[in-house]
Image: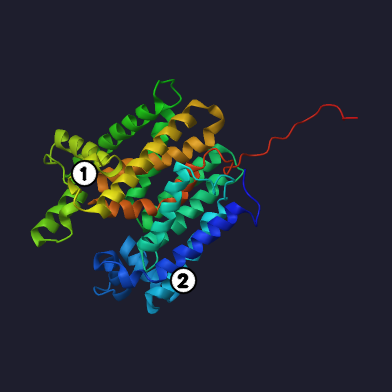
Protein backbone atom coordinates (compact mmCIF):
# COMPACT_ATOMS: atom_id res chain seq x y z
CA UNK A 1 0.00 0.00 0.00
CA UNK A 2 1.02 3.62 -0.46
CA UNK A 3 1.77 5.64 2.63
CA UNK A 4 0.04 8.75 3.83
CA UNK A 5 1.99 11.86 4.73
CA UNK A 6 3.86 12.30 8.04
CA UNK A 7 4.99 8.76 8.80
CA UNK A 8 8.36 7.08 9.06
CA UNK A 9 8.46 6.07 5.38
CA UNK A 10 7.71 9.55 4.10
CA UNK A 11 9.99 11.19 6.64
CA UNK A 12 12.85 8.86 5.67
CA UNK A 13 12.28 9.64 1.99
CA UNK A 14 12.34 13.39 2.71
CA UNK A 15 15.44 13.00 4.91
CA UNK A 16 17.27 11.14 2.15
CA UNK A 17 16.20 13.84 -0.28
CA UNK A 18 17.58 16.60 1.95
CA UNK A 19 20.86 14.71 2.49
CA UNK A 20 21.28 14.00 -1.23
CA UNK A 21 20.57 17.66 -2.01
CA UNK A 22 23.26 18.85 0.41
CA UNK A 23 25.79 16.31 -0.83
CA UNK A 24 24.93 17.20 -4.43
CA UNK A 25 25.39 20.93 -3.81
CA UNK A 26 28.98 20.22 -2.76
CA UNK A 27 29.68 17.67 -5.51
CA UNK A 28 31.62 20.06 -7.75
CA UNK A 29 34.15 20.58 -4.96
CA UNK A 30 35.08 16.92 -4.41
CA UNK A 31 34.19 14.95 -7.56
CA UNK A 32 36.97 14.08 -10.05
CA UNK A 33 37.04 16.21 -13.21
CA UNK A 34 35.80 13.32 -15.37
CA UNK A 35 32.45 13.34 -13.52
CA UNK A 36 31.90 16.96 -14.56
CA UNK A 37 33.12 16.65 -18.16
CA UNK A 38 29.59 16.50 -19.62
CA UNK A 39 28.52 19.44 -17.46
CA UNK A 40 31.32 21.56 -18.91
CA UNK A 41 30.35 20.59 -22.45
CA UNK A 42 26.69 21.43 -21.83
CA UNK A 43 27.37 24.79 -20.18
CA UNK A 44 30.11 26.07 -22.49
CA UNK A 45 28.70 24.84 -25.83
CA UNK A 46 32.20 25.27 -27.22
CA UNK A 47 31.30 23.93 -30.67
CA UNK A 48 27.91 25.68 -30.98
CA UNK A 49 25.93 22.43 -30.87
CA UNK A 50 22.77 23.94 -29.39
CA UNK A 51 19.59 22.57 -30.94
CA UNK A 52 16.58 20.39 -30.27
CA UNK A 53 17.62 17.06 -31.80
CA UNK A 54 20.26 14.91 -30.10
CA UNK A 55 21.13 14.51 -26.43
CA UNK A 56 23.91 17.11 -26.35
CA UNK A 57 22.19 19.77 -28.52
CA UNK A 58 18.92 19.38 -26.60
CA UNK A 59 20.65 19.44 -23.20
CA UNK A 60 22.58 22.58 -24.14
CA UNK A 61 19.37 24.24 -25.32
CA UNK A 62 17.46 23.12 -22.22
CA UNK A 63 20.01 24.51 -19.79
CA UNK A 64 20.39 27.77 -21.70
CA UNK A 65 16.64 28.37 -22.04
CA UNK A 66 15.99 27.62 -18.35
CA UNK A 67 18.93 29.77 -17.22
CA UNK A 68 20.46 26.87 -15.29
CA UNK A 69 23.63 27.10 -17.37
CA UNK A 70 24.30 30.54 -15.84
CA UNK A 71 24.13 29.29 -12.25
CA UNK A 72 26.85 27.89 -10.04
CA UNK A 73 26.78 24.08 -9.93
CA UNK A 74 25.81 24.15 -6.24
CA UNK A 75 22.66 26.12 -7.11
CA UNK A 76 21.91 23.75 -9.98
CA UNK A 77 22.07 20.88 -7.48
CA UNK A 78 19.78 22.77 -5.09
CA UNK A 79 17.19 23.04 -7.86
CA UNK A 80 17.54 19.71 -9.68
CA UNK A 81 17.75 17.21 -6.82
CA UNK A 82 14.49 18.27 -5.07
CA UNK A 83 12.70 18.19 -8.44
CA UNK A 84 13.83 14.60 -8.99
CA UNK A 85 12.79 13.54 -5.49
CA UNK A 86 9.41 15.19 -6.01
CA UNK A 87 8.89 13.18 -9.20
CA UNK A 88 9.94 9.92 -7.54
CA UNK A 89 7.72 10.70 -4.56
CA UNK A 90 4.75 11.17 -6.91
CA UNK A 91 5.18 7.53 -7.94
CA UNK A 92 4.29 6.57 -4.38
CA UNK A 93 6.30 5.86 -1.24
CA UNK A 94 5.68 2.24 -0.21
CA UNK A 95 4.86 1.20 3.36
CA UNK A 96 8.04 -0.91 3.47
CA UNK A 97 10.41 1.92 2.51
CA UNK A 98 11.79 2.45 6.04
CA UNK A 99 12.59 -1.22 6.68
CA UNK A 100 16.15 -2.54 6.58
CA UNK A 101 15.89 -4.89 3.61
CA UNK A 102 18.10 -5.69 0.64
CA UNK A 103 15.84 -4.00 -1.89
CA UNK A 104 15.53 -0.86 0.23
CA UNK A 105 19.30 -0.76 0.58
CA UNK A 106 19.64 -0.89 -3.21
CA UNK A 107 17.08 1.89 -3.64
CA UNK A 108 18.67 4.08 -0.95
CA UNK A 109 22.08 3.78 -2.60
CA UNK A 110 20.66 4.60 -6.03
CA UNK A 111 18.97 7.67 -4.58
CA UNK A 112 22.30 8.68 -3.05
CA UNK A 113 24.00 8.34 -6.45
CA UNK A 114 21.80 11.15 -7.74
CA UNK A 115 24.11 13.47 -5.78
CA UNK A 116 27.14 12.24 -7.73
CA UNK A 117 25.64 11.99 -11.22
CA UNK A 118 22.70 14.41 -11.53
CA UNK A 119 23.38 17.36 -9.21
CA UNK A 120 24.94 19.51 -11.95
CA UNK A 121 24.12 20.12 -15.64
CA UNK A 122 23.53 16.61 -16.91
CA UNK A 123 21.77 14.72 -19.66
CA UNK A 124 20.56 12.28 -17.01
CA UNK A 125 18.47 15.01 -15.37
CA UNK A 126 16.45 15.34 -18.57
CA UNK A 127 16.37 11.55 -18.89
CA UNK A 128 14.89 11.12 -15.40
CA UNK A 129 12.34 13.89 -16.01
CA UNK A 130 11.10 12.19 -19.16
CA UNK A 131 11.18 8.66 -17.72
CA UNK A 132 9.24 10.09 -14.78
CA UNK A 133 6.45 11.05 -17.20
CA UNK A 134 6.43 7.51 -18.60
CA UNK A 135 6.38 6.09 -15.06
CA UNK A 136 3.37 8.27 -14.18
CA UNK A 137 1.57 6.77 -17.17
CA UNK A 138 2.49 3.27 -16.00
CA UNK A 139 1.06 3.81 -12.49
CA UNK A 140 -2.15 5.45 -13.75
CA UNK A 141 -5.49 3.59 -13.53
CA UNK A 142 -5.78 2.92 -17.26
CA UNK A 143 -5.89 -0.37 -19.11
CA UNK A 144 -2.72 -2.30 -19.85
CA UNK A 145 -3.21 -1.86 -23.60
CA UNK A 146 -3.35 1.91 -23.21
CA UNK A 147 -0.26 1.88 -21.00
CA UNK A 148 1.66 -0.15 -23.57
CA UNK A 149 0.54 2.10 -26.42
CA UNK A 150 1.19 5.43 -24.67
CA UNK A 151 4.53 4.37 -23.16
CA UNK A 152 5.66 3.09 -26.57
CA UNK A 153 4.75 6.39 -28.22
CA UNK A 154 6.54 8.33 -25.46
CA UNK A 155 9.68 6.22 -25.90
CA UNK A 156 9.49 6.78 -29.66
CA UNK A 157 9.19 10.55 -29.21
CA UNK A 158 12.09 10.59 -26.75
CA UNK A 159 14.23 8.61 -29.18
CA UNK A 160 13.45 11.14 -31.91
CA UNK A 161 14.78 14.20 -30.08
CA UNK A 162 17.13 12.81 -27.43
CA UNK A 163 18.46 9.23 -27.48
CA UNK A 164 17.73 7.33 -30.71
CA UNK A 165 18.28 3.84 -29.28
CA UNK A 166 15.39 4.31 -26.82
CA UNK A 167 12.98 3.38 -29.63
CA UNK A 168 14.30 -0.17 -29.27
CA UNK A 169 13.27 -0.40 -25.59
CA UNK A 170 9.50 -0.86 -26.18
CA UNK A 171 10.15 -2.89 -29.34
CA UNK A 172 12.22 -5.48 -27.46
CA UNK A 173 9.85 -5.31 -24.47
CA UNK A 174 6.92 -5.90 -26.83
CA UNK A 175 8.65 -8.87 -28.43
CA UNK A 176 9.20 -10.38 -24.99
CA UNK A 177 5.57 -9.68 -24.06
CA UNK A 178 4.24 -11.47 -27.14
CA UNK A 179 6.45 -14.52 -26.60
CA UNK A 180 5.30 -14.67 -22.96
CA UNK A 181 1.86 -15.66 -24.18
CA UNK A 182 3.40 -19.08 -24.79
CA UNK A 183 3.89 -21.09 -21.61
CA UNK A 184 7.64 -21.51 -21.04
CA UNK A 185 9.49 -22.65 -17.95
CA UNK A 186 12.09 -20.36 -16.40
CA UNK A 187 10.44 -17.37 -18.08
CA UNK A 188 12.83 -14.81 -16.62
CA UNK A 189 15.82 -16.52 -18.24
CA UNK A 190 13.95 -17.21 -21.47
CA UNK A 191 12.82 -13.58 -21.68
CA UNK A 192 16.40 -12.35 -21.45
CA UNK A 193 17.53 -14.88 -24.06
CA UNK A 194 14.67 -13.85 -26.36
CA UNK A 195 15.56 -10.19 -25.85
CA UNK A 196 19.21 -10.84 -26.68
CA UNK A 197 18.30 -12.85 -29.79
CA UNK A 198 15.92 -10.16 -31.00
CA UNK A 199 18.54 -7.48 -30.34
CA UNK A 200 21.04 -9.49 -32.38
CA UNK A 201 18.48 -9.77 -35.21
CA UNK A 202 17.96 -5.99 -35.17
CA UNK A 203 21.72 -5.46 -35.22
CA UNK A 204 22.17 -7.85 -38.16
CA UNK A 205 19.40 -6.03 -40.04
CA UNK A 206 21.03 -2.70 -39.22
CA UNK A 207 24.36 -4.04 -40.45
CA UNK A 208 22.84 -5.22 -43.72
CA UNK A 209 21.61 -1.67 -44.39
CA UNK A 210 24.38 0.47 -42.89
CA UNK A 211 27.38 -1.80 -43.42
CA UNK A 212 28.23 -1.90 -39.70
CA UNK A 213 26.56 -3.76 -36.85
CA UNK A 214 25.24 -1.79 -33.87
CA UNK A 215 27.98 -2.50 -31.33
CA UNK A 216 30.62 -2.00 -34.01
CA UNK A 217 29.26 1.39 -35.09
CA UNK A 218 28.71 2.68 -31.55
CA UNK A 219 30.62 1.18 -28.64
CA UNK A 220 33.54 -0.41 -30.46
CA UNK A 221 34.31 2.55 -32.75
CA UNK A 222 34.07 5.03 -29.88
CA UNK A 223 36.39 3.01 -27.68
CA UNK A 224 38.86 2.58 -30.53
CA UNK A 225 39.07 6.37 -30.86
CA UNK A 226 39.52 6.71 -27.09
CA UNK A 227 42.43 4.28 -27.18
CA UNK A 228 44.04 6.16 -30.06
CA UNK A 229 43.78 9.42 -28.10
CA UNK A 230 45.28 7.78 -25.01
CA UNK A 231 42.23 8.44 -22.82
CA UNK A 232 43.36 8.14 -19.19
CA UNK A 233 39.90 6.97 -18.10
CA UNK A 234 39.70 4.22 -20.72
CA UNK A 235 40.63 1.35 -18.39
CA UNK A 236 36.96 0.45 -17.69
CA UNK A 237 36.01 0.41 -21.38
CA UNK A 238 33.79 -2.42 -22.60
CA UNK A 239 35.71 -3.98 -25.48
CA UNK A 240 34.53 -7.19 -27.12
CA UNK A 241 37.05 -10.06 -26.96
CA UNK A 242 36.55 -10.61 -30.71
CA UNK A 243 36.09 -8.10 -33.57
CA UNK A 244 32.42 -7.16 -34.03
CA UNK A 245 32.58 -6.99 -37.83
CA UNK A 246 31.03 -10.41 -38.48
CA UNK A 247 27.74 -12.03 -37.47
CA UNK A 248 29.62 -14.27 -35.05
CA UNK A 249 31.66 -11.39 -33.66
CA UNK A 250 28.60 -9.15 -33.22
CA UNK A 251 26.76 -11.94 -31.41
CA UNK A 252 29.66 -12.35 -28.99
CA UNK A 253 29.94 -8.58 -28.60
CA UNK A 254 26.26 -8.20 -27.62
CA UNK A 255 26.46 -11.09 -25.16
CA UNK A 256 29.74 -9.86 -23.69
CA UNK A 257 28.36 -6.34 -23.30
CA UNK A 258 25.22 -7.57 -21.55
CA UNK A 259 27.15 -9.59 -18.98
CA UNK A 260 29.76 -6.87 -18.47
CA UNK A 261 27.11 -4.24 -17.74
CA UNK A 262 24.67 -6.31 -15.69
CA UNK A 263 26.59 -9.27 -14.26
CA UNK A 264 30.08 -7.73 -14.16
CA UNK A 265 32.08 -10.64 -12.78
CA UNK A 266 34.86 -9.83 -15.24
CA UNK A 267 35.19 -6.50 -13.42
CA UNK A 268 36.96 -8.25 -10.56
CA UNK A 269 40.19 -7.45 -12.40
CA UNK A 270 39.81 -3.97 -10.86
CA UNK A 271 40.33 -5.39 -7.35
CA UNK A 272 42.85 -2.60 -6.72
CA UNK A 273 40.14 0.07 -7.25
CA UNK A 274 37.68 -0.12 -4.32
CA UNK A 275 35.28 2.42 -5.84
CA UNK A 276 34.98 0.40 -9.05
CA UNK A 277 34.42 -2.85 -7.12
CA UNK A 278 31.73 -1.14 -5.02
CA UNK A 279 29.86 0.01 -8.13
CA UNK A 280 30.18 -3.42 -9.74
CA UNK A 281 28.80 -5.13 -6.65
CA UNK A 282 25.86 -2.72 -6.68
CA UNK A 283 25.15 -3.60 -10.33
CA UNK A 284 25.42 -7.32 -9.64
CA UNK A 285 23.14 -7.27 -6.58
CA UNK A 286 20.63 -4.96 -8.29
CA UNK A 287 20.40 -7.25 -11.31
CA UNK A 288 20.01 -10.34 -9.11
CA UNK A 289 17.17 -8.84 -7.05
CA UNK A 290 15.36 -7.58 -10.15
CA UNK A 291 15.82 -10.96 -11.84
CA UNK A 292 14.19 -12.69 -8.85
CA UNK A 293 11.30 -10.20 -8.89
CA UNK A 294 10.94 -10.65 -12.64
CA UNK A 295 10.48 -14.37 -12.16
CA UNK A 296 7.81 -13.81 -9.51
CA UNK A 297 5.92 -11.34 -11.67
CA UNK A 298 5.93 -13.68 -14.66
CA UNK A 299 4.48 -16.52 -12.58
CA UNK A 300 1.51 -14.49 -11.33
CA UNK A 301 -1.08 -13.22 -13.79
CA UNK A 302 -2.24 -10.50 -11.41
CA UNK A 303 1.08 -8.71 -12.04
CA UNK A 304 0.42 -8.15 -15.77
CA UNK A 305 0.93 -4.37 -15.46
CA UNK A 306 4.13 -4.86 -13.47
CA UNK A 307 5.32 -7.32 -16.12
CA UNK A 308 5.31 -4.55 -18.73
CA UNK A 309 7.42 -2.34 -16.44
CA UNK A 310 9.97 -5.11 -15.93
CA UNK A 311 9.94 -5.94 -19.65
CA UNK A 312 10.88 -2.32 -20.36
CA UNK A 313 13.59 -2.32 -17.71
CA UNK A 314 15.22 -5.57 -18.84
CA UNK A 315 14.98 -4.49 -22.48
CA UNK A 316 16.94 -1.41 -21.43
CA UNK A 317 19.52 -3.59 -19.64
CA UNK A 318 19.97 -5.62 -22.82
CA UNK A 319 20.46 -2.48 -24.91
CA UNK A 320 23.03 -1.19 -22.44
CA UNK A 321 25.15 -4.16 -23.43
CA UNK A 322 25.10 -2.86 -27.01
CA UNK A 323 25.66 0.86 -26.57
CA UNK A 324 27.49 1.47 -23.27
CA UNK A 325 31.16 2.32 -23.93
CA UNK A 326 32.39 1.75 -20.36
CA UNK A 327 31.32 0.75 -16.86
CA UNK A 328 31.12 4.34 -15.63
CA UNK A 329 28.63 5.28 -18.34
CA UNK A 330 26.61 2.15 -17.59
CA UNK A 331 26.19 3.17 -13.94
CA UNK A 332 25.37 6.77 -14.84
CA UNK A 333 22.73 5.71 -17.36
CA UNK A 334 21.12 3.28 -14.92
CA UNK A 335 20.51 6.25 -12.64
CA UNK A 336 18.76 7.82 -15.64
CA UNK A 337 16.03 5.15 -15.50
CA UNK A 338 15.49 5.34 -11.73
CA UNK A 339 11.71 5.91 -12.13
CA UNK A 340 11.39 2.48 -13.77
CA UNK A 341 13.77 0.98 -11.22
CA UNK A 342 11.58 2.36 -8.42
CA UNK A 343 8.43 0.74 -9.84
CA UNK A 344 10.21 -2.56 -10.44
CA UNK A 345 11.72 -2.73 -6.95
CA UNK A 346 8.33 -2.11 -5.36
CA UNK A 347 6.28 -4.19 -7.77
CA UNK A 348 4.29 -5.75 -4.90
CA UNK A 349 3.40 -2.50 -3.10
CA UNK A 350 0.36 -1.49 -5.17
CA UNK A 351 2.06 1.55 -6.68
CA UNK A 352 0.73 0.60 -10.11
CA UNK A 353 -3.01 1.14 -10.49
CA UNK A 354 -5.55 -0.74 -12.57
CA UNK A 355 -8.76 0.54 -14.14
CA UNK A 356 -11.71 0.34 -11.77
CA UNK A 357 -14.14 -2.44 -12.60
CA UNK A 358 -17.79 -1.44 -12.68
CA UNK A 359 -20.55 -3.97 -12.13
CA UNK A 360 -23.68 -3.72 -14.20
CA UNK A 361 -26.97 -4.98 -12.76
CA UNK A 362 -30.02 -5.94 -14.80
CA UNK A 363 -32.32 -5.34 -11.87
CA UNK A 364 -32.21 -2.57 -9.31
CA UNK A 365 -30.65 -3.51 -6.02
CA UNK A 366 -32.99 -3.22 -3.06
Q: Residues within 10 Å of mark 1 (few under 14, many from 20)?
A: few
Q: Is 98 placed left or right of 161 in the picture?
A: right
Question: Foreground residue, 45 or 204?
Answer: 45
Say above or below: 235 vs 319. Answer: below
Which of discs 1 and 2 lies nearer the camera? The answer is 1
Say above or below: 299 vs 332. Answer: above
Residue at position x 38%, y 71% in the image: 26
Estimate the x, y position of residue 81 in percent, counting from the top left. Answer: 46, 65
Q: Earlier in the sequence, mark 1 or mark 2?
A: 2
Identify the mark at residue 78; answer none if there is no mark. 2
Question: Foreground residue, 289 or 354?
Answer: 289
Say above or below: 110 vs 142. Answer: below
Residue 316 visible in the displayed image: yes
**Residue at the extreme right:** 366
Determine whether the residue tagged by mark 1 lies in a helix, strand or loop: helix
Residue at position x 28%, y 70% in the image: 41
Estimate the x, y position of residue 94 in percent, counting from the top left. Answer: 57, 46
Question: Foreground residue, 5 or 329?
Answer: 5
Disc 1 vs disc 2: Cβ atoms closer than 8 Å? no
Residue at position x 49%, y 59% in the image: 16
Q: Which residue is mark 1?
A: 268
Label 1, label 2: how far apart the Cα atoms are: 36 Å
Identify the mark at residue 174; answer none if there is no mark. none
Estimate the x, y position of residue 273 in percent, counting from the top left. Answer: 21, 53
Q: Is 213 placed left or right of 137 in the picture?
A: left
Determine whether the residue tagged by mark 2 lies in a helix, strand or loop: helix
Query: Which part of the image, by quadrant, shows the C terminus?
Result: top right
Amino acid sequence: MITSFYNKNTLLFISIGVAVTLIGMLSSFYLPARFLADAGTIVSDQYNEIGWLGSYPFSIGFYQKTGLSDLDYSLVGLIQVPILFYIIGKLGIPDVFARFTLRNGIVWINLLLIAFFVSYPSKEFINILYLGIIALVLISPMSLRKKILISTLLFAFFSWFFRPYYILVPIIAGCIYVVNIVSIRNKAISNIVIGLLFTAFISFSYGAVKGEFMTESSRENLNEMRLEKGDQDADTMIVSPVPADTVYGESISILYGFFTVNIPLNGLRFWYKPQVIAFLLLQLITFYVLFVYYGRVLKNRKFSHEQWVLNLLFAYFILQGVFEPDLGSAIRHKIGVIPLLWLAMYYDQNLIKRPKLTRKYIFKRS
